[in-house]
Image (cartoon, rainbow, N blue to C red):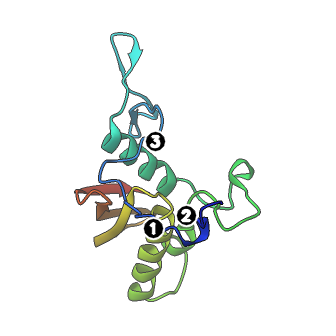
Amino acid sequence: MLPKITQLKFKEQKSKNLLKMGKSFLFDFDKGDFVVKDGRLVEANDVESLKVWIEKILRTQREKYLVYKRSDEEEYGVILEDLIIGNNYSHSFIESEIKREINSALMRNTIISSVSDFKIEKNNTKLKVYFKVNLINGKSFDEEVTV
């Protein structure tokens, strides 16, 4: 006689440890190059790797580069240029759309549980965004990105 598999119940556990994102290297976005020490690329730890991923995704304009084009809802990047340059939208609308775009892009990462405490500064064509990234393991860190 076979066991009744459909009636078995399993406990689901979310890992409190950060999930491995694969090997990643530190990138200096101000210089536009990887960080090198003693002639070798500097490997990023879990949080550093996540910070590099966040900065990359927020600096990439969705739908601008064909290499990132996908047919599903998981396109890479954000749409912020229209909100920063040449529009007549109210400040509150722009701010809420920036928050929505960033939140939507970052919540695709399974390590991130939420994004909060936004502060947005606009200076001509540059946008500086401060926010808190809350992780599934209960830890969090503050992030600052200039777009």
User: Mark 3 sits on what residue?
Assistant: 21
User: Considering the image in quadrants, where does the C terminus appear?
Assistant: bottom left
Residue toward you, 104 or 67? 104
Residue in the picture at 44% in, 89% down: 90
Label disc, if present, on residue 102 of the rendered structure: 1
Precedes in sequence: disc 2 or disc 1: 2
In this rendering, position of residue 129 left or right of residue 75: left
Disc 2 crowd rating (10 Å Cα; few below 14, some 14-19, many 20+) is many
Disc 3 crowd rating (10 Å Cα; few below 14, some 14-19, many 20+) is some
Label disc, if present, on residue 78 of the rendered structure: 2
Disc 1 crowd rating (10 Å Cα; few below 14, some 14-19, many 20+) is many
Residue toward you, 30 or 51? 51
**103 is higher (above) or lower (below) than 48:** below
Q: What element carries label 3?
A: loop
Amino acid under disc 2: Val
Regarding residue 121, the answer to whether it shows in the image is no
> Picture coordinates of residue 3 (x, y %)?
59, 62
**135 is higher (above) or lower (below) than 80:** above
> Picture coordinates of residue 26 (x, y %)?
38, 32
In this rendering, position of residue 88 left or right of residue 76: left
Dots 2 and 3: beta carbons under 8 Å? no
- Residue 49 position by quadrant: top left
Q: Which residue lies furthest to the top in this view?
A: 38
User: Considering the image in quadrants, where does the N terminus appear?
Assistant: bottom right
Cα distance between the residues tagged 2 and 1: 7 Å
Residue in the picture at 57% in, 58% down: 77
Q: Is mark 2 on a helix, strand or loop?
A: loop
Q: Is mark 1 on a helix, strand or loop?
A: helix
Residue in the picture at 68% in, 52% down: 68
> Picture coordinates of residue 46 (x, y %)?
34, 40
Cα distance between the residues tagged 2 and 3: 21 Å
Amino acid under disc 1: Ile
